[in-house]
Image (cartoon, rainbow, N blue to C red):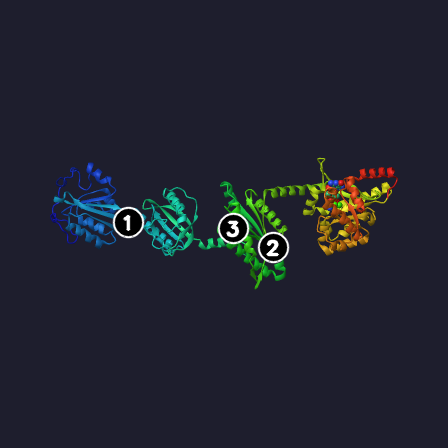
C-alpha cells in the first residue's frame, strides 16, 4: 500500500508550503521551547548523537534540528529559524560538489515519503558526509522526514588510503619476481601473476597444493604455527612442483598479516633451483673423483661411518674391500698415462656393474678402489668380493688392444675388524697387502689374529725406535772353531736387545720387524761399527788375530752404499778387511741380483770374506753358489739338530759338505750341541763348528776373559 502523496512536492526547490505544525502537533514533548533548539529530553537525545539531524514535515517546514547539524553545514541560525526547508537546502546545495545530483535525489525522496535512502556526499571543502534519510512517524501516517548527516571524512580517507596501499601492494606483487601468496585458514586467497604462471590457478586451493609430498608436513606445520600467530623461524627451503610437473626449489618466507580483520599469512617464495643445482654440482665435485665420477675417500668415509653406526645398532656387519689393480704401473709405463686412465675408468665400470645400488665403490686414488658392502653377512660379502675379482680378470679393451689384468683384494668386516672407518680401512689394507705378497690376483680376508699381529708390530716398531735412541742394543759373541783342531777361528756377532726393564730380547723377535720397517739400516750400521770396534779391542787385549762374522740382512745388502758403509766401519775401528766376514742369506743374495753381486765382489776385492748363512733353508741353486764370491757356507742348525735322529737331514748335511768341497768352499756346522753332532760333522769333513757345545754367545768382555782362559789352558791361540 502506497503512503499518501505529500502535499508539498517541490518540482524544484522552492518555498515551503502549508502551515507550520505546532510542536504539539508533532508530538514533540519540548513544547515549552522554541522549535529547533530543543531542550530537555528531546534536546538530550538529539544532541547525544554524533550525527547532524534535521526534521522536516511533509509540508517542507523545518520541525527540528540539532547543534551538530548547524555546525556541520555551517548554516546561519536565521535560516533555521525561518523554518523554511528551501532556505536550508539552498545553504546545503552551495556546499556540495555535485549539487544537481544531490537535488535530484532529494526530489525523489519528496515524491516517495515512505522511502529510506543513503548516500555519500562530497563537499567542496573536501569533506565527505554520509546522508541517511528515513520517514518520520509510522508507515501508515507519515509525517515528514528525518535527515541525518554524518561526517565520514576520516573513515573514508582511511579507506581510500587502504585502497591505495592495496593497489600499491598489488603493483608490487604483480611486478615481483617471486611467488606471492596470501592464505587465510588453509585457503589461498591471493596469488600474484608470477605464482599463477608458475603453478597455475591456485586461488581457493590449500596452501600446500604445490608442495612436494616429502615437504608437505613441514610446510603444514609452519603454516599452522603462523596462523596461530606463533613466531616461525626465518626462511626455509622447500621443493615445489610447478604446473609442468617439474620439481623446483624455493626459499620460502612467511609473515602473519591482518586481512579484513582476520589473521592471514603472506608467503614469498623465491626460486632457488639454479642455486641449488650449483650447490649440488659443487658438492658432487667435492665428493667425487674426477676421472671415474666415483665417490672419493671423503664420501666413502661418510657412508662407511653411517653404515657402521647402523651395523652397531642392529648388530649387523659392514664389509669393506680394498682393491688394487695388479701391475697397474706396467700399463702406465708401457702404454702411457692415457691408457692407464682408460683402464681405471673401465675398471670402475666393471666394479659398478657387479655391485648393487646400496653398495658404494669409491676411488681412493691411483689404482686403488674401496668398496663398501653394508648389511651383508660375511659369506655374502666374500661372494661379492670373489665376483669383483673375477670381473677384473676379464680382458679389458684399452687403447684399442685387449688387456688382461688382475686385482688384489683385501676384505675386512666391521665392526669386528675395525671399530671405525679408519681402522677398518687399515685392516682391509693389511689384508690387501697379504694378497699382494701371496702372489696377487687373489682375495685375502682380514682376521683378528692378523689384527693383533699388526698392533704388536706397531708397538714393537715404536719400541725399536726408542731402543735405538737409548742405546739398548748390544752385541754378544759366539766362538767358531776349527773342527779337527778345536782352535778358535773367529766369533759371530749376535745382537741382543736389553730392555730398560732388564729383559733381553732375542733377534728372532725383532730383526724381522726391523727389516720390514727399514729400521734394519740404522741397526745394521750399529752392529757393523760395534763389531769392528769390539774385535779391534779384543785383538789388542788378547794380542792375537781374530775374525768377526757379522750378519747382514737383505735390506742392508740392497743399500746402494753398502760397500762404503763397510769400509767406513773398518776404517773407524782401524781394522783390516781380512778380519771381517759378512754372513748373507741366500735370499739377500738373490734379491737385486746384479747390483748385489757387484757389491759383494767389491767387498771381496777389499779383503772381506763372505759366507752363505742358513744354507739349505732357501732355494740356493748350484748356479748361484758358483757365481757368488763366497768363501764358506753355514749348514743351518735345523739340519745339525736332527743329526742322529733324522736320516734325511743327515744325508743333507753330508751332501752339503761334499758339494761345498766340490766348489772349494769351507763348511761351518751351526748349532752343534752334542758330541754326536760334532763327531758326525767332523767325520764328514765339516771344516768349522759353532754351537753351545763349543761356546754360547756372550758379551764382549766375558768372551775376552773366556778366550784368555782358553789360551792359558791350552797355551795356544791361532
Ligand atoms: P744365525 O745367523 O743363524 O745365528 C745363529 C743363531 O743360532 C743365534 O741365534 C745363536 O744364538 C744360535 N745358536 C748358536 N749355537 C746354538 C746351539 O747350539 N743351539 C741352538 N739352538 N742355537 C744356537 P740368535 O742370536 O738368536 O740369532 C738368531 C738369528 O738372528 C741369527 O741367526 C741371525 O739370522 C739373526 N741375527 C742375529 N744377530 C744379527 C745381527 O746383528 N744382524 C742381523 N741382520 N741379523 C742378526
Ligand atoms: Ca749368522
Ligand atoms: Ca745361521
Between marks 1 and 3 in the image, the one whose residue lies nearer the viewer: 3
Residue wearing tag 3 = 360
Residue 456, given in percent of the width and then of the height, sits at: 64, 41
For residue 299, say whether it is visible. no
Q: Residues within 10 Å of mark 1 (few under 14, many from 20)?
A: some
Say which of 576 and 16 sits in front.
Answer: 576
Q: CA distance from mark 3 to mark 2?
A: 21 Å
Left/right of residue 491 with respect to residue 402 in the rendered view:
right
Residue 6 in the image, given as x and y percentages of width and height: 12, 48
Q: Is residue 138 visible in this depiction of the protein?
A: yes
> Which callout, 1 or 3, points at the residue further toward the start of the chain?
1
Q: Residues within 10 Å of mark 3 (few under 14, many from 20)?
A: many
Task: Identify which residue is drawn at 51% across, 53% down.
Answer: 354
Of residues 231 and 586, the one drawn nearer to the viewer in this rendering: 586
Q: Which residue is mark 1?
A: 127
Classify the position of the C terminus by image quarter: top right
Which is in the foreground here, disc 1 or disc 2?
Answer: 2
Q: Is residue 23 above or below residue 240?
A: above
Find numbered disc 2 in the image and state the secondary structure of the residue it sits on: loop
Among numbered discs 1 and 2, the one appearing first in the sequence: 1
In the picture as drawn, the residue positioned furthest to the front comes out as: 647
Q: Which residue is mark 2?
A: 326
Residue with the most extreme right position: 715
Task: Indicate the position of residue 423 as horizontal and vertical percent values.
Answer: 58, 44
Check disc 1 and report its element: helix, strand or loop: loop
Amino acid at each position: 500500500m502506497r503512503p499518501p502523496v505529500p502535499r508539498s512536492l517541490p518540482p524544484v526547490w522552492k518555498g515551503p508550503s502549508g502551515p507550520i505544525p505546532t510542536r504539539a502537533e508533532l508530538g514533540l514533548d519540548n513544547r515549552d521551547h522554541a522549535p529547533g533548539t530543543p531542550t530537555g529530553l528531546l534536546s538530550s537525545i538529539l544532541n547525544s548523537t554524533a550525527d547532524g539531524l534535521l526534521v522536516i514535515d511533509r509540508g517542507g517546514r523545518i520541525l527540528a534540528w540539532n547543534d551538530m547539524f548547524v555546525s556541520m553545514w555551517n548554516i546561519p541560525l536565521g535560516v533555521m529559524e525561518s523554518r523554511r526547508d528551501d532556505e536550508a537546502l539552498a545553504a546545503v546545495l552551495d556546499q556540495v560538489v555535485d549539487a544537481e545530483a544531490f537535488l535530484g535525489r532529494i526530489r525523489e525522496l519528496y515524491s516517495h515519503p515512505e522511502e529510506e535512502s543513503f548516500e555519500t556526499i562530497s563537499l567542496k571543502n573536501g569533506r565527505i558526509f554520509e546522508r541517511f534519510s528515513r520517514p518520520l512517524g509510522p508507515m501508515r501516517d507519515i509525517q515528514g522526514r528525518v535527515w541525518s548527516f554524518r561526517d565520514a571524512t576520516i573513515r573514508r580517507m582511511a579507506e581510500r588510503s587502504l585502497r591505495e596501499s592495496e593497489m600499491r601492494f598489488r603493483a608490487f606483487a604483480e611486478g615481483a619476481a617471486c611467488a606471492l601468496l596470501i592464505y587465510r585458514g588453509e585457503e589461498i586467497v591471493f596469488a600474484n601473476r608470477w605464482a599463477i604462471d608458475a603453478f597455475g590457478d591456485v586461488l581457493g586451493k590449500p596452501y600446500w597444493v604445490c608442495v612436494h609430498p616429502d615437504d608437505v608436513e613441514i610446510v603444514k606445520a609452519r603454516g599452522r604455527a603462523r596462523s596461530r600467530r606463533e613466531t616461525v623461524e626465518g626462511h626455509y627451503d622447500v621443493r615445489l612442483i610447478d604446473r609442468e610437473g617439474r620439481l623446483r626449489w624455493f626459499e620460502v618466507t612467511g609473515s602473519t598479516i591482518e586481512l579484513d580483520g582476520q589473521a592471514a599469512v603472506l608467503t614469498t617464495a623465491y626460486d632457488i633451483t639454479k642455486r641449488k643445482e650449483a650447490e649440488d654440482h659443487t658438492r658432487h665435485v667435492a665428493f667425487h673423483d674426477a676421472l671415474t665420477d666415483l665417490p672419493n675417500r671423503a664420501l666413502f668415509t661418510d657412508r662407511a661411518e653411517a653404515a657402521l653406526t647402523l651395523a652397531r645398532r642392529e648388530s649387523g656387519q659392514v664389509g669393506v674391500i680394498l682393491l688394487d689393480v695388479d701391475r697397474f704401473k706396467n700399463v702406465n709405463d708401457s702404454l702411457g698415462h692415457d691408457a692407464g686412465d682408460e683402464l681405471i675408468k673401465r675398471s670402475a665400470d666393471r666394479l659398478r656393474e657387479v655391485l648393487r645400488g646400496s653398495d658404494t665403490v669409491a676411488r681412493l686414488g691411483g689404482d686403488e678402489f674401496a668398496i663398501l658392502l653394508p648389511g651383508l653377512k660375511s659369506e655374502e660379502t666374500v661372494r661379492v668380493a670373489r665376483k669383483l675379482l673375477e670381473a677384473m680378470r676379464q680382458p679389458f679393451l684399452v687403447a684399442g688392444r685387449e688387456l688382461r689384468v688382475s686385482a688384489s683384494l683385501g676384505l675386512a668386516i666391521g665392526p669386528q675388524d675395525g671399530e671405525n672407518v679408519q681402522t677398518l680401512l687399515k685392516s682391509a689394507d693389511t689384508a690387501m697387502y697379504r694378497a699382494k705378497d701371496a702372489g696377487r690376483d687373489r682375495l685375502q680376508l682380514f682376521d683378528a689374529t692378523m689384527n693383533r699381529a699388526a698392533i704388536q708390530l706397531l708397538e714393537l716398531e715404536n719400541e725399536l725406535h726408542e731402543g735405538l735412541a737409548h742405546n739398548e742394543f748390544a752385541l754378544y759373541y759366539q766362538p767358531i772353531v776349527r773342527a779337527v783342531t778345536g782352535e778358535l777361528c773367529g766369533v759371530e756377532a749376535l745382537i741382543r736387545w736389553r730392555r730398560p726393564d732388564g729383559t733381553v730380547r732375542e733377534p728372532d723377535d725383532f730383526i724381522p720387524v726391523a727389516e720390514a720397517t727399514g729400521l734394519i739400516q740404522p741397526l745394521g750400521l750399529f752392529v757393523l761399527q760395534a763389531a769392528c770396534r769390539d774385535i779391534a779391542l779384543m785383538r789388542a787385549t788378547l794380542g792375537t788375530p781374530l775374525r768377526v762374522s757379522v750378519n747382514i740382512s737383505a735390506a742392508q745388502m740392497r743399500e746402494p752404499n753398502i760397500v762404503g758403509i763397510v769400509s767406513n766401519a773398518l776404517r773407524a775401528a782401524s781394522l783390516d778387511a781380512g778380519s771381517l766376514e759378512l754372513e748373507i742369506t741366500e735370499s739377500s743374495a738373490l734379491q737385486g741380483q746384479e747390483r748385489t753381486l757387484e757389491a759383494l765382489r767389491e767387498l771381496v776385492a777389499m779383503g772381506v770374506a763372505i759366507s752363505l748363512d742358513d744354507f739349505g733353508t732357501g732355494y740356493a741353486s748350484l748356479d748361484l753358489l758358483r757365481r757368488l764370491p763366497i768363501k764358506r757356507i753355514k749348514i743351518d742348525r735345523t739340519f745339525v739338530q736332527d743329526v742322529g735322529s733324522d736320516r734325511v737331514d743327515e744325508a743333507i748335511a753330508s751332501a752339503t759338505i761334499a758339494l761345498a768341497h766340490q766348489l772349494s768352499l769351507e763348511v761351518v756346522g751351526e748349532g752343534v750341541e752334542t758330541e754326536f753332532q760334532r763327531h758326525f760333522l767332523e767325520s764328514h769333513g765339516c771344516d768349522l763348528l759353532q754351537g753351545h757345545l763349543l761356546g754360547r754367545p756372550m758379551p764382549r768382555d766375558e768372551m775376552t776373559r773366556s778366550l784368555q782362559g782358553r789360551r792359558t789352558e791350552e797355551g795356544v791361540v791361532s
